[in-house]
Amino acid sequence: MTTEIHHDGVTIAMCRGGRGRPLVLCPGLLTTQDDLRELIELLRLDHDVLSFDLRGHGRSSPADRYTFDALLGDLTAVLATLDEPPLLVGHSLGADLAVHHAAKHAVAGLVLIDGANPVPEPFLGEADLPEFRAMAEELAAHQSLTAADILALNLEIDVVRAGILARYRQLDRPVTMIMSTSMAGNSEEGRTPWRNRNWRAGVERLTRELPSITTHWLDADHRLVVTHAPEIARILARC
């Protein structure tokens, strides 16, 4: 079933289907329901899945602001349409949004896919900005978001993750993480090896602080929601 909601001056496109207990799937930055089609179909075998597009993504309308709080408002508005707390699943930025939502609102559990990681060092230092600016320019050619929007959100995510441990400590529901072994890819050149080490170090830091968190590592990069959908669905079936 396809539907939409209106809030904060934007229209959020949603789709619901499947059977079982409710599950909400929150996509990451520049990811849409269409990108996650295989994973959504697999999850519907065990769950009543509500998927949606964030503002400016996919079939949702553009907006005049793309801040972390604005995107968190999108997720909160979607969850308000449900009658009971769902299993909340987020990928990348969607995982960060899920943690922040669950710190203040009831959920049945959290599954965080390659996001919400309290990395020891920010990913976007001064040395990284030229590369990320060029990447943002390329990505913006096919998006409602501008290159400036994309870069600003990536910088804001670094700030959010610097303080996310405090949010984790507010959670009172089970947390499962599904993380990629090569978040930044498999290249041994440039900053890629450091980015992968920083990513793993963030998860290790989190699990030292909160050993109750269950962690699964997949031999994949950050596109694991697309490339490893069956493996992710099998893990979620047990959550």
Image (tube, rainbow, N blue to C red):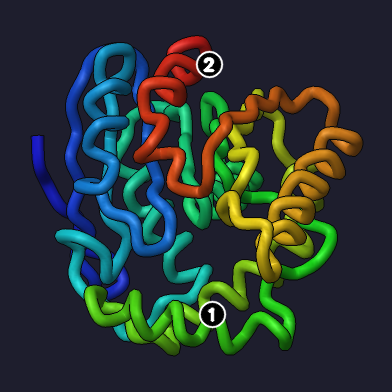
Looking at the rendering, in which quadrant would you find the N terminus?
Answer: top left
Corner quadrant of residue 54: bottom left
Q: Which mark is residue 239?
A: 2
Q: Residue 222: where, in percent of width, then height? A: 51, 48
Asked if residue 87 lies left or right of residue 145, the reply is right
Marks 2 and 1, how far apart at CA: 35 Å
Can residue 57 be spotted in the picture?
Answer: yes
State whether residue 122 is above or below residue 198. below
Question: Residue at position x 70%, y 68% from top?
Answer: 191
Q: Which mark is residue 132?
A: 1
Q: Nearer the viewer, residue 157 or 186?
A: 186
Question: Residue at position x 64%, y 50% from top?
Answer: 116
Helix, strand or loop status at disc 2: loop
Amino acid beneath label 2 = Cys
Q: Residue 209: where, in percent of width, then height? A: 89, 38
Question: Residue at position x 44%, y 47% from top?
Answer: 223
First in sequence: mark 2 or mark 1?
1
Corner quadrant of residue 212: top right
